[in-house]
Image (spheres, rainbow, N blue to C red):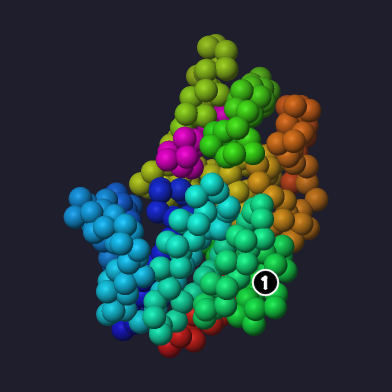
Amino acid sequence: MKKVIIYAYTQFNLGDDLFIKILCERYPDTQFLLYAPRGYQKLFHMLPNLRVFPSDTLWFRGVRLLSRKLHLEHVLCNIIAKNYDMAVYIGGSLFIQGENWKKEFRNNKALKLTNKPFFLLGANFGPYDDDEFYIAYKKLFHTYTDICFRDRHSLELFRDLPQTRMAADIVFQLQMPTANTQEKMVVLTVIKPSIRKHLVNSDQLYYQKMSEVAIHFIERGYQVTLMAFCVIEQDDEALTAIKQRIPKHLIPNVATYVYQYHIDEALQILVQSSFIVASRFHAMILGWVMGKPVFPIVYSRKMTNVMQDLHFTGKYCDFDALHTLKANDVFASLNNSTINVSNPVKEAEEHFLLLDKYMK
């Protein structure tokens, strides 16, 4: 039996948690190890081949802090991984240049196991502001066994590295639950814009526009579900702020859902909807996979990159143009914002092309 370490964004974000689920379910005869907050033991209790080692214990946090102070992160990772065959770093927006990017780079560099295969699957690169960030990661990527990006823009940045490839987002591989669509139920997945540096002054405008969209649907006989994908990124605060802007007499038509431990429950809400207003990247992807009309609210270039790759021709709104958004334009997208996902579903499997061979 192969033994594999998973590195991922483990902050109870629905999209990133789906990556882990898909990976473990694809290789049921492989033993996986994930360092994550102890809540992930509850989240993934149904995966017998995944061992979650709690990263939020006092002992583990102390050891990691000491290793960082002594600049021994690489040594620590290799001690932990000595009994494992390879590592898979799986996720989406893993390489964004922030103020402390050099510290984050050292952490990413330490994940590379000495003389063992290392796979990077499902990511996009950027946004970034200067070449030093790009050059540093290009040198690091050169040491990886296999890299499969989820968008063409990222691939083009590293096309001269022989181990780089591209495939549609991994979540296109997800096996969806079955449920009857509720004809007049719309889901608005929401975000708190200001946790992103380039959207620091956008909260109030965004909350107002989302409340206007919710009201427009309610007045036309729809039930509206405001949905938060990630508490650590304060989606739940955004949910509350939007709901407070909806008149009290309409509140009986508003439901709220905050994801944390129940993936299938969250997917059921989306699959039962008749329309999705997607402020979250993976709400957009999930909506397409489920065959739902989707209206994207674009907070990051990663969304437009994927829309271009998949030739999405429906309407959407970028944050730069959010002040022009009209609720009736969103409503008009009910009938013309789906895409044919047969090709992306097939292409998404190519993320695992080389990993399949190593697993055998």
Q: Look at the image and give the residue range highlighted in magenta.
A: 223-235
Up the image or down, 13 lies above or below 49; here it is: above
Q: Is any part of residue 222 visible from this angle? A: no
Question: On the image, which quarter does residue 335 sit in?
Answer: top right
Residue at 41% x, 68% y is 110
Q: Work out whether residue 162 or residue 271 is closer to the camera in this orientation and state it.
A: 162
Q: Work out whether residue 178 or residue 144 is closer to the camera in this orientation and state it.
A: 144
Up the image or down, 191 lies above or below 285; here it is: above
As for residue 359 lying within the magenta part, the answer is: no
Residue 56 coordinates in the image, percent (x, y) = 27, 51
**Relative horizontal placement of residue 64, taking residue 86 as reference (left or right):** left
Residue at 69% x, 50% y is 301
Q: Work out whether residue 216 or residue 19 is closer to the camera in this orientation and state it.
A: 19
Residue annotated with mark 1: 158
Question: On the image, which quarter does residue 210 sit in?
Answer: top right
**Relative horizontal placement of residue 206, taking residue 307 as reference (left or right):** left
Residue at 76% x, 57% y is 308
Residue 328 coordinates in the image, percent (x, y) = 76, 27
- Which residue is situated farthest in the front direction here? 70
Q: Work out whether residue 320 or residue 344 is closer to the camera in this orientation and state it.
A: 320
Amino acid under label 1?
Phe
